[in-house]
Amino acid sequence: MELTSDNKLKKIIVVGDRILIKPVKEAQKTATGIYLPPGVQEKEKVQSGYIVKAGPGYPIPHSVEEEEWKAEDEKIKYIPLQVKEGDLAIFLQKGAFEVQYDSEKYFIVPQSSILMLEREEDLFG
C-alpha cells in the first residue's frame, strides 16, 4: 500500500486515553510586530492543535464473573473520550509528547491535559 496524504495516518492506532494532535502554526510575529523565533513559541505552556486521531478511551475493568464464552475482544469496554477528530484543542504543553511522523510534527496528549475544545458542529442543537 502506498502512503498518500489521505491514508498515511490510517496505520496509526492511538491507545487508551491518548490523543494525536497536529499543532496549529502560530504567527511568527507578535501583535506589536516583534518577530519570534520558533523556539520561543514551542516553549509556551499552552498549545493548540487539531485532533487527528483519538484512542478508544479509559478501559473499564471487567469482573471475572462476566460471560466466559465471549471472545476476548468483546469483553473489553471503554469509557469514551470527549474529543472527536477535527476538534481544535487547547492543551498543556507539559503533558504532551512531541513526535515526528512522515516529517511532520505531532503531539501525543492524554485527555487530562486538554483544557478546552472547539467543535464546528452545534453542541446544543
Image (cartoon, rainbow, N blue to C red):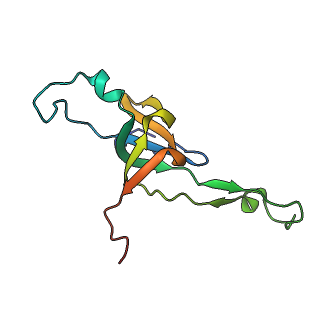
Q: Is residue 10 visible?
A: no
Q: x, y percentage for residue 53?
A: 46, 49
Q: Is 35 on the left-hand or right-hand side of 61?
A: left
In the picture, residue 117 is in which quadrant? bottom left
Give the vertical position of 86 relative to 11 (above or below): below
In the picture, residue 29 is in which quadrant? top left
* Label total for image: 0
Q: Quadrant of the C terminus?
A: bottom left
Q: Is 71 on the left-hand or right-hand side of 104?
A: right
Residue lying at the far left of the rendered structure: 33
Residue lying at the far front of the rendered structure: 32
96 or 45: nearer the viewer? 45
Q: Is residue 22 visible?
A: yes
The residue sitting at 16% across, 32% down in the picture is 30
Residue lying at the far bottom of the rendered structure: 125
Q: x, y percentage for residue 66?
A: 85, 66
Give the vertical position of 40 relative to 54 (above or below): above
Q: x, y percentage for residue 69?
A: 86, 66
Give the vertical position of 110 relative to 87 (above or below): above
The residue sitting at 39% across, 34% down in the picture is 45
The residue sitting at 50% across, 41% down in the picture is 109
Q: x, y percentage for residue 92?
A: 44, 39
